[in-house]
Amino acid sequence: MASETATPAQRQAVDTIIGEVQKYLSARYITISRVRPEIERVWDDLVFQGVAQLQLTLSNSKPFGPVRYHVAETLVGDDDRQARDFLSPSHTNSIMAEIVEADDKAGATKRMEGTLEIHDLRTLFKMIEPSFTTTVSLVQTFIWWDFEDAVDLSRFEIKAQRTKNYMDGKLTDPVREWYQGRMQMKMQPTDEEIITYELCQMRRSVDSFCTRRVGEPGFKRIICREQPPTDPSDAIVAVLANHLRLQAHLRAGNALDANLQGQIAAVLSMEAAEVTPEVALAYVDSLVADTRTSLRSELNTSGRGGKPYFMKPRQEVILREKFKAIVGDRVLPEKNVSMDKVPKDPGTSAQPRQ
C-alpha cells in the first residue's frame, strides 16, 4: 500500500515500529563498532537500506482470504492470529523473507543465470566489497531479532496514547460504535468498558514482551553501559569549539595575540617572533583535526567504562511501571477472558477511526 494512500493510523503504525527498530540498531552498533571499527564505513548505508526495505514491507498489505490487511496496522492491532502469521517463518504471509534475505537463492540464481548477478543487497555488496556481505546479513538479522519486541513496544505506545485520550473524555459515538462491533456487544459499550478493553490489549503487549525475556539466548541480547554523571565527550566538544573559534579568527586575517603567540611558540619549541599567522593557523588546523578524531572515537565508544547491563530487561521494568501507572486504581478482568481476545471479524478495520 502506497504511503500517500495510507490512513493516519497506518502511517503511525509504520513510523512507530520503524522508530523502535532504529533504537535497537543504534544500541547494537555501539558494541559492533568497538569489536570491528571498520564497519563504521558502511554501517549507516546498510542500516538505511535495511530500514527502507522494512518500511516498504510494513506499508504493504497481505491477504487473509478475500480481504487484504495493512501489515503494520495489523501488527499493532488486536487480531493476534493475523499478527502471528506475519511473524511466523513458515506461514505463507510471513514477512521474514522480505526482511532477511536467504543465503542460498539457488532457484533465483538459476533463473537469472547468464543475466543479472545482482538481485539483492547481499549480492550487491558482494560485488562491491565481498567482506561486507556478512555485514548485510548482520543488519538484517538484527532487525529480525528485535522486530517482535519493537512491535510490542509500538503497540503498547499507540494504545497507551489512545487510552489516555479516552480517559480524558475524547471518545465519540462513531468510535463507540466501532468498539461495539469489535467487542461483539449487543449494546454500545460504556466508556469505561472501552478503556478496560484497551488496557487488556496493552497488558497483552506487556506480557508478550516480558515473556520473551525468559530464557532469551545470550547472543541475541543487547549490551548497554551506564552513562557516567558527566559525559567525557562534552569536554571534547568544548575544546573543539574553542579551537574552531580560534581557527576562524586566524583565517579571517586577524592579528596574533601576544599571549597566544607565546603559548604556540612554547609548544613548538620556537621563538615567539617565529610564530607567524601562517604557522599559528597550521598548528590550530592540526589541533582541530586531532580533536575531531578524538571526539568521533569517544562518541563511537561512549559508555565503554560504565557498568554493563542488558537493554531489554531494563525496558521490561520500565514497561511494567508505565502500564501500572496507566491502569491506576482500575481492576482489570483476569487474563484469558474475552476482554483479552478479539473476535475474528474480517470485515472490520484494524484500528478505530478517531
Image (cartoon, rainbow, N blue to C red):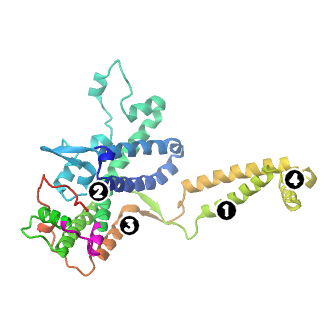
Whole-number angstrom distance, CA of label 2 to CA of label 1: 43 Å
Residue neighbourhood size for the residue with mark 2, other residues' Cα within 10 Å, grouped as few (<14), some (14–19), many (≥20): some
Looking at marks 4 and 1 on the same chain, the residue that comes earlier in the sequence is marked by 1
Looking at marks 3 and 2 on the same chain, the residue that comes earlier in the sequence is marked by 2
Looking at marks 2 and 4 on the same chain, the residue that comes earlier in the sequence is marked by 2
Q: Is residue 139 magenta?
A: no
- Circle 1 SS class: helix
Using the image, determine if residue 354 lies above or below residue 127: below
Classify residue 113 by image quadrant. top left
Indicate which label's residue lies in the foreground, 2 or 4: 2
Q: Is residue 29 left or right of residue 153?
A: right
Residue receiving disc 2 = 9
Indicate which label's residue lies in the foreground, 3 or 1: 1
Looking at marks 3 and 1 on the same chain, the residue that comes earlier in the sequence is marked by 1
Which residues are the magenta region?
Answer: 162-173
Res. 302 visible in picture:
yes
Question: Is the Cβ of the residue at disc 3 closer than 8 Å to that at disc 4?
Answer: no
Q: Is residue 159 left or right of residue 265?
A: left
State the image coordinates of residue 78 (x, y, percent, origin top left). 20, 59
Whole-number angstrom distance, CA of label 2 to CA of label 4: 67 Å
Q: Residue at x 14, y 68 (%)?
A: 339
Q: Residue at x 33, y 72 (%)?
A: 322
Q: Is residue 317 left or right of residue 188?
A: right
Q: Is residue 163 magenta?
A: yes
Residue receiving disc 1 = 238
Residue receiving disc 4 = 269
Disc 1 marks which amino acid? Answer: Ala
View extreme (top): residue: 114
